[in-house]
Amino acid sequence: MKERRKVDLPDNARPILEQRYLRKDASGEIVETAEAMFWRVASAVAGAEGRWGVAPEVWAERFYDVMARLDFLPNSPTLMNAGTEGGQLSACFVLPVGDSMEEIFDALKWTALVHKSGGGTGFNFSGLRPSGDVVRSTCGVASGPVSFMELFDTCTEVVKQGGMRRGANMAILDCDHPDLLSFLKAKTKEGRLANFNISVALSDAFMETLEADGDWSLVNRRRGETVRTLPAREIFDLLVESAWATGDPGLVFSDRIEADNPTPQVGRIEATNPCGEQPLLPFESCNLGSINLLHMIDGDDFDWKKLEKTVRLAVRFLDDVIEINGFPLPQIAERSRGNRKIGLGVMGWAESLFRLGVPYDSDEALRRAERLMAFVTASGRDESRLLAEERGVFPNWEGSRWQERGIPLRNATVTTIAPTGTISLICGCSSGIEPLFALAYRRKVFEERTLTYVNALLVEELKKRGLDDEARLRPIAEKGSLAGLGLPDDLTRLFVTSHEIDPAWHVKMQAAFQRHTDNAVSKTINLPEEASVDDVASAYLRAYREGCKGITVYRDRCKATQVLYRGGGG
Ligand code: CDP
């Protein structure tokens, strides 16, 4: 084998790769190095190039290089499964659930197949008749969406994703479904629906009714009957209280998402994937990938040339992934190949801001976010246009919004901001566009030994200023943040952590990225434990006002709180 670049893995990455990513033989022995893994992925993905008469070897070397440098990584299923039998490479799926036993159990079977292959699934359960409604064939009563969700939850619990990780689900319910109120509270009991994130789809009409303090109707669509009318404010309050207490439900702004649907002629957007960043049609899938921004910095700005090169290579890579993807169902293959959606995003944003000397919660950071993401989307889209010249537009282009705008593209969408939960650990950078949760943490390595990890960029900065002595590092390690430690103000201001950032800034940052992202943005608005119900309400309203496509909040330690309180902290 040709001598290839060695991978310089961060310390914490090795055990993750060994446990879940590197191939093992029948006896469970690891038979792959990190280099061999990246080569397996690079050569499998580049294999697609042959279809257009391009020599795959050249691209395999380039794909290898960009991954081995940890400049760009595709989503976990691609790293785990590319180059293996049946290799399913996408992280995100949306499946339809119809209002009959056959359709519900079909969806359940599809879910098991998708999870087994490493993907996460999103559903909209609004098509199911409400609980208490009549079932004609048995003269019985329907169980309603929330009960059926329990089935999907159990199925997920049993079927691990390719034996690698637990599956993840998103359940969405439209805001006029009669079971809305029980859906809002579906997760308030500890441990219930543990494999689901839940979100309410709020329409523009609902938001206008809420604004006008009007009444809202819950409707049995099958019968065309209004089941109940209540103040929109009451629904919103319940929703926010539940989110304050448990983190669920989140919101998705369904009309806004539909307005950005690039292929309305094919169908409506049905739901999002589990973490909310990828809206999809029924039976559609998407493969994601993210650029490590920490590797794209030169001095006090981004290295735009390097970034552009990386974006173009990543778009080509992700388009090739669609070609070699082993889709788990024929319906999914057809939809996904018809739209060819890809989701290129970024990771390491918070640490890039450390490096650039810009505090996360500042106007300057928002400006930089917009400039960065506008550039990524513009370069990515231009690459997709070039690919369309070479390989043809995506099959559903005719009649799409892109055709209306006269832009030939290979991919119906190009950019998405993923959470990058695992791939950011492999790269050793902060995840997605999230601020750091803590600047240091302690980890038990052996029974009697605990190691403290302090953020490398912080240590570097402390060293530069001669402040890296043990007496200063210890309290940082204990506290996880610099607040109140008497360090220089500019340092405390720059190395700001998640709970010190006002929720409004969290939302503003999400909105800044959303403005230049084709799909959606994964972001958790982290609130301190003492945040009030009103804080959650303001974050939700701000997200709508600022143009986000959805929002998720998480109040520190809230899962331990079981009782709902109204108005401020409890
Ligand atoms: O970093 P990695 O590629 O592993 O994934 P991520 O960016 O944290 O998550 C991207 C998407 O993968 C999620 O939105 C889910 O659709 C899916 N996912 C899943 O199905 N199961 C998990 N345990 C984690 C992620």
Image (cartoon, helix red, strand yellow):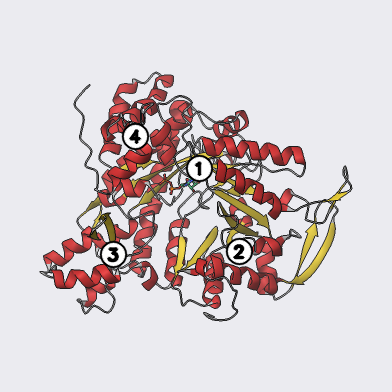
In the rendered picture of this protein, how many numbered marks are placed on residues? Answer: 4
Circle 1: residue type: Thr
Q: Earlier in the sequence, mark 2 or mark 1?
A: 2
Q: Residues within 10 Å of mark 4 (few under 14, many from 20)?
A: many
Q: CA distance from mark 4 to mark 2?
A: 38 Å
* Mark 1 or 4, nearer chain start: 4
Considering every residue shown, the one lying at the far top of the view is 53
Distance from the alpha carbon under mark 3 to that under mark 1:
35 Å
Q: CA distance from mark 3 to mark 4?
A: 29 Å
Q: Gap between marks 2 and 1, in whole Å?
A: 38 Å
Residue at image point 55% right, 70% down: 245
**Which numbered disc, 3 or 1, marks the residue closer to the eye?**
3
Q: Which residue is mark 3?
A: 439
Q: Is mark 1 within 8 Å of ligand 1?
A: no
Q: Residue at x 76, y 52 (%)?
A: 143
Question: To which quarter of the image does residue 63 belong?
Answer: top left
Label drawn at residue 189? 2
Q: Which residue is mark 4?
A: 22
Give the position of the N terminus as an image quadrant. Answer: top left
134 or 123: which is nearer to us? 134
Rate crowding at label 3 as few (under 14), some (14 to 19) or many (20 or more) other CA atoms within 10 Å. many
Helix, strand, or loop for circle 1?
Answer: loop
Q: Which residue is mark 1?
A: 413
- Horizontal arrangement in the rendering, residue 394 relative to residue 46 (left or right): right
Q: In the picture provided, is 450 more to the left or to the right than 347? A: left
Between circles 2 and 3, the one closer to the viewer is 2
> Which mark's residue is nearer the viewer, 3 or 4?
4
Picture coordinates of residue 109 (x, y %)?
64, 36
The answer to whether residue 266 is seen in the rendering is no
